[in-house]
Image: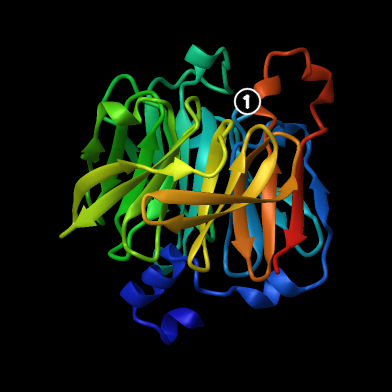
Amino acid sequence: MMRNVLPRAALRLLLACGTLALSDPGSAAGPDEIALPASGRHPENVAADAKGNLYVSSITEGGVLRVDAGSGAVTPFLAPGSHGTRSTFGVLVDEPSGTLWVASNDASMLRIPGPSGTEGAWVKALDLRTGALKSSVRLPDPRSIANDFALGSDGALYVTNTASPQILRLKPGAAEFEIFAEDPALKGGLDGIAFGTDGDLYVNTFMTGELFRVAVEGGRAGRITKLATSRPLKFPDGLKPHRTGFLMVEGAGPLSRVTIRGEEAVIEDVRRFDGPSGLTIVGDRVWVSEGRIGAIGAGDSGQAAGSKLRSLRLD
């Protein structure tokens, strides 16, 4: 529907900046929390399509679940281990191309075996309607963990490499990633990534709790600036555009609003969750995946069906 009204580039720009209100499904009455089955234990990320369906990855179980945010019904979308996937991390809906992007990794370095023996870090493009595999691209650096995604206004896909200080880019139709930005300053475990309304990229680092702006100049990476945060960040993870700033979750619990003021970032806590790892915005509601990443391997295997998605309405 919307694709017939807006040019594809304009639609991508609205999606990238978080200004396209998918309000009908997101504003409808629905559950405030959804319990995930054992196959969705430790959900690493969550994304949403224009119909209000949520797509949930799992760092321990792999695969992707599709969840009806209105009814809470859960169905498999990507079977664990299928299409050469292993542990699944970032997920991103690309409506203009009808694609669900999925990050798949050999996370054995994190003592997470995953559902298959596939080696390396991969980004899979799945048909958003059928789940069929459209393309599969491996990250070039042997030391790679493909983590989170951002979509450029031109349809290029940007992905953070948690194991190396790299932001990679996959241009539309390309068969290989290119290094968009690489800098030792980003060595603290790149994770969340999002475009700001200024057209620059913003990324955080999970282990060192930092927030950076990567200037985008003529399609190339420019100056990388570490932003001073109004409070310390503890395991920052998912980062999404919201209005003129961002929403961000931290593994330590908070969902926060992030407002950029020059080289400073004002962090305003909204609500706490149980080990949040990802978020997505649908209309006036934000959904948070409680990945509880820090609990992996800490004797929580008996809580296989205890992972949840939780939501709240935004002001």
Residue in front for this viewpoint, 300 or 76: 300
The quarter of the picture where residue 295 lies is top right
Q: Residue at x 80, y 49 (%)?
A: 34
Q: Position of residue 241 (x, y in %)?
A: 49, 59
Q: Left or right: where does residue 238 sit relative to residue 32?
A: left
Q: Position of residue 208 (x, y in %)?
A: 47, 26
Residue in front for this viewpoint, 313 or 308: 313
Q: Quadrant of the C terminus?
A: bottom right
Asked if residue 132 can be seen in this view, the reply is: no
The quarter of the picture where residue 78 lies is top right
**Residue topped by disc 1:** 60
Q: Left or right: where does residue 198 sit relative to residue 229?
A: left
Quick check: 141 above or below 159?
Answer: above
Q: Left or right: where does residue 29 sit relative to residue 215?
A: right
Q: Secondary structure at mark 1?
A: loop
Q: Position of residue 93 (x, y in %)?
A: 49, 57
Q: Residue at x 58, y 23 (%)?
A: 115
Q: Amino acid at mark 1?
A: Thr
